[in-house]
Image (cartoon, helix red, strand yellow):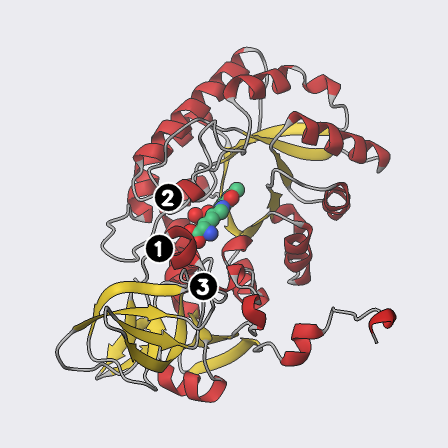
């Protein structure tokens, strides 16, 4: 479900024609729907209502302050992975007790800041990291709360770059290593090791990998209980897949129904860390066709957005639906939709059948709310796009387009070169 729909021949975001936004703010432009985000958050919240879980929105999916604030206002917590994300989280005034912090490479500075901020807990991913958190907590005379990220060695049936729960991935600890840590927990005197965490991958369409992983983790928790170790939290991560093309992902309700019996067994407080499920279909990237170029082999629509603005097709071969903002009638043609960047991987669609496309047309690349702007860069010295939030008939600029000054703001030419 999303709030980008054609009314007559024009694409609207909620009650605003997207063409108006493109005219006002220029292209490329990210446009987000408030209602779509909130609806997705609520779907998940309602599906798990009996557990009253803490839903920690995964900030990496889209860390725009306004979007994160929408969710925090709805009661969400935040899942962070860096000092930068901690800074952004605190910036929007979230209760730090609703922040969980994963990452295989937390630095000492990041750890110290998170301890001082009194976050809910770290999702720790290695013994070395536990030692570091323990040492820093000691020097700050604090007890740091920690959950152990378990790598349940499950195949999530998704793209290999976004698979995280196999033992060949760098994430988490094996069940046996995790068990040893719990047995050894008195040696971490400044830690309260109070939960287990898993996150097995992203864009997972079916419930079965989650069920498989949670089963292993439930058995693990039962083993802990048998030796007298009782914990408080079970964090089942994110990873719920969404519709980009013809996927038929589990709904939030089906997901909850499938895993609830397992969760109930544990009697633990449940945490979820969804990113894509909440923002993925709440955003589009609007771009303009600069040139239509016909080679002997192909037709290319060259647009003003590039792989620096949206890297998912180049990096993962990801499919994104692309539509004209003004619906066109006419015979479909097969073409590539590509950006202006000097790389052949700079494409948004290959061999795509589209209604007629002309120079000057505005296109929407759908389903780009998650891992769109948050993965954008300045490659080719391009300015990162503006972001606009639509709520009903109103719209708000939530990030300005970068300027040429921004592009050189942090660079210095040493005197000897002048
Ligand atoms: N929790 C942890 C520990 C994570 O690493 C992630 C995502 C999430 C939660 C949220 O996962 P989600 O619900 O959004 O699937 N750039 C890739 C996706 C990378 C996901 C990284 N981790 C893409 O564009 O498909």
- Distance Cα–Cα, label 3 vs label 2: 22 Å
Front residue of 390 and 228: 390
Q: Is residue 266 above or below residue 345?
A: above
- From the Cβ of disc 2, is ligand 1 less than 8 Å away? yes
Count neighbours of disc 2 (C-alpha within 10 A) and say few if under 14, some if 14 to 19, many if 20 or more. Answer: some
- From the Cβ of disc 3, is ligand 1 less than 8 Å away? no
Tell me the SS state at disc 2: loop
Q: What residue sits 24% from the left and 70% below the top?
A: 298
Count neighbours of disc 3 (C-alpha within 10 A) and say few if under 14, some if 14 to 19, many if 20 or more. Answer: few
Q: Quadrant of residue 23?
A: bottom left
Picture disc at residue 318: 1
Q: Earlier in the sequence, mark 2 or mark 1?
A: 2
Q: What residue sits 64% from the left and 38% below the top?
A: 122
Tell me the SS state at disc 1: loop
Front residue of 408 and 122: 408
Picture disc at residue 343: 3
């Amino acid at each position: 479900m999303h709030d980008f729909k054609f009314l007559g021949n024009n694409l609207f975001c909620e009650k605003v024609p997207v063409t108006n936004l493109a005219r006002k703010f220029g292209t490329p432009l990210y446009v987000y729907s408030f209602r779509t985000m909130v609806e997705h958050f609520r779907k998940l919240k309602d599906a798990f209502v009996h557990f009253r879980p803490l839903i920690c929105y995964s900030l990496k999916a889209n860390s725009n302050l306004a979007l994160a604030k929408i969710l925090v206002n709805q009661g969400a917590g935040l899942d962070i992975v860096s000092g930068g994300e901690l800074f952004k989280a605190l910036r929007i005034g979230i209760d730090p007790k609703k922040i969980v912090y994963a990452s295989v490479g937390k630095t000492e500075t990041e750890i110290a800041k998170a301890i001082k901020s009194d976050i809910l807990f770290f999702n720790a991913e290695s013994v070395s990291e536990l030692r570091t958190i323990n040492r820093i907590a000691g020097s700050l005379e604090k007890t740091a709360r920690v959950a152990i990220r378990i790598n349940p060695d499950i195949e999530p049936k998704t793209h290999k770059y976004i698979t995280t729960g196999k033992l060949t991935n760098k994430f988490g600890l094996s069940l046996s290593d995790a068990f040893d840590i719990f047995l050894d927990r008195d040696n971490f005197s400044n830690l309260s090791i109070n939960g287990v965490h898993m996150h097995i991958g992203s864009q997972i369409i079916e419930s079965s990998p989650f069920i498989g992983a949670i089963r292993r983790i439930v058995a693990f928790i039962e083993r802990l209980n048998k030796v007298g170790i009782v914990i408080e939290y079970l964090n089942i991560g994110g990873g719920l897949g969404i519709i980009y093309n013809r996927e038929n992902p589990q709904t939030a309700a089906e997901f909850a129904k499938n895993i609830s019996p397992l969760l109930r067994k544990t009697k633990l407080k449940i945490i979820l860390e969804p990113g894509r499920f909440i923002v993925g279909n709440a955003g589009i990237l609007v771009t303009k066709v600069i040139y239509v170029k016909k080679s002997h082999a192909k037709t290319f629509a060259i647009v003003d957005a590039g792989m620096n603005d949206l890297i998912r097709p180049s990096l993962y071969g990801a499919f994104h639906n692309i539509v004209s903002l003004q619906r066109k009638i006419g015979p479909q043609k097969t073409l590539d939709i590509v950006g202006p960047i000097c790389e052949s991987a700079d494409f948004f669609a290959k061999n795509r059948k589209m209604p007629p496309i002309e120079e000057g047309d505005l296109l929407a690349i759908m389903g780009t709310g998650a891992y769109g702007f948050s993965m954008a860069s300045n490659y080719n010295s391009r300015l990162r796009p503006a972001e606009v939030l639509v709520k009903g008939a109103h719209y708000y600029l939530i990030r300005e387009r970068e300027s040429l000054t921004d592009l050189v703001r942090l660079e210095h030419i040493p005197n000897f070169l002048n």
